[in-house]
Image (cartoon, rainbow, N blue to C red):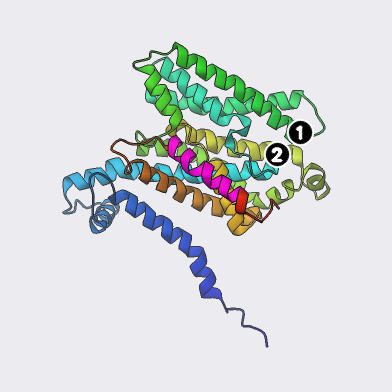
Amino acid sequence: MTRPPAAGWPRRVLLRALPFVALVALALLSLGTGRYGVPLGDVLTVLGDTLLGRTGEVDATARTVILQVRLPRVAAALVVGAGLAAAGATYQGLFRNPLVSPDILGVSAGASLGAVAGIFLSLPVAAIQILAFLGGLGAVAIVYGVGAAVRRHDPVLTLVLAGVAVGAVLGAAISLFKVLADPYNQLPAITYWLLGSLAAVTLSDIAAILPAVLIGLVPLVLLRWRMNLMSLGEEEARALGVETRLMRPLFVAAATLVTAACVSVTGAIGWIGLIVPHVARLLVGPDFRRLLPASLVLGAGYLLAVDLAARTIAPIEVPLGILTALIGAPFFLWLLATARRGWS
């Protein structure tokens, strides 16, 4: 006797909806938690009043804290966490290595150099963000140019080696700026930016990077089935009909665009693009059709939780880069020691 087609349907729907419900609950918790605590009911009231255009009866201080201080941070954590995780999953599939992160082609180093140069020149915040964005894109363009000039049998290995070399040069340039910077004003600002933070992010910043993030995510979503073929290797993918010379630059450009946009407003936040896709792969497998949405949800939730911890565990706010390293590195070592499921 066969099982009816509808059997198990409620359970599947519940399992798929549970991560999103948990993400919403975490976002509401972040909106109400901090030095100025706001009850959940007031958080829901403020959000509802804002959507309906009403003034409401919630205390003005609570309303200001939620809408002007915490809501931009929550929105930034959701967008940036999801974007970095999706970019990391793309790079790992493209280079067939779960140890790869968005830093592999120098996008974070290029964005950092652009931002550091802007801070060194005492430019406005908007100009610093633009320089960081262009720096990330420029770094990957240089890496790809070097990879195209050095024609080796394995193009993936060439890109990785070029990324390591270009990243080292960009890191040296950042160190030079730090040496030349004013130790009282510029150097602290440079150091803080390099550690990553959501403290200064505004809703206008999110609105500015959101188009770039969406433009980068669209081809990843539409062509996610081809990533499965790309992860088989150069020759296998070509044998299955994938034009690797077209697909590889497209995937790299999309992931780079997302990473550069995210890093330009939050600073360099490491480990998200490395840890989250790896965890998602352990949960849903290597199929990019499931891996990409899982990475998006887990990345958003992870950065949201880290940001909540960053502003509550100490009297002063802890930079996100410190927490992501303290959490990510031991967790990643534990995964390497205990995971039994392979890359593919």
Q: Amino acid at mark 1?
A: Pro
| Residue furthest to the top | 180
Residue 3 picture location, percent across and down: 63, 83
Question: Which label is found at residue 182?
Answer: none
Asked if residue 273 is positioned above or below residue 293 in the image, the reply reads above
| Residue 333 among magenta residues | yes
**Place of residue 139 in the rendered image (x, y in percent of width and height, measured from the top left):** 60, 25
Q: Is residue 123 visible?
A: no
Quarter of the image for residue 143 reads top right
Q: Secondary structure at mark 2?
A: helix
The residue where tag 2 is placed is 248
| Magenta part, dominant SS | helix
**What is the span of residues highlighted in magenta in the rendered image?**
321-336
Q: Position of residue 334 (x, y in %)?
A: 56, 49
Q: Residue at x 78, y 47 (%)?
A: 237
Viewport quadrant of the N terminus: bottom right
Q: Secondary structure at mark 1?
A: helix
The alpha-carbon separation of the residues under discs 2 and 1 comes to 10 Å
Residue under label 1, please give it: 155
User: 68 or 187: which is nearer to us?
Assistant: 187
In front here: 141 or 301? 301
Q: Kindly identify the residue that appears in the image at 60 percent across and 19 percent down.
A: 169
Q: Amino acid at mark 2?
A: Arg
Taking the image as drawn, is residue 317 in sight?
yes
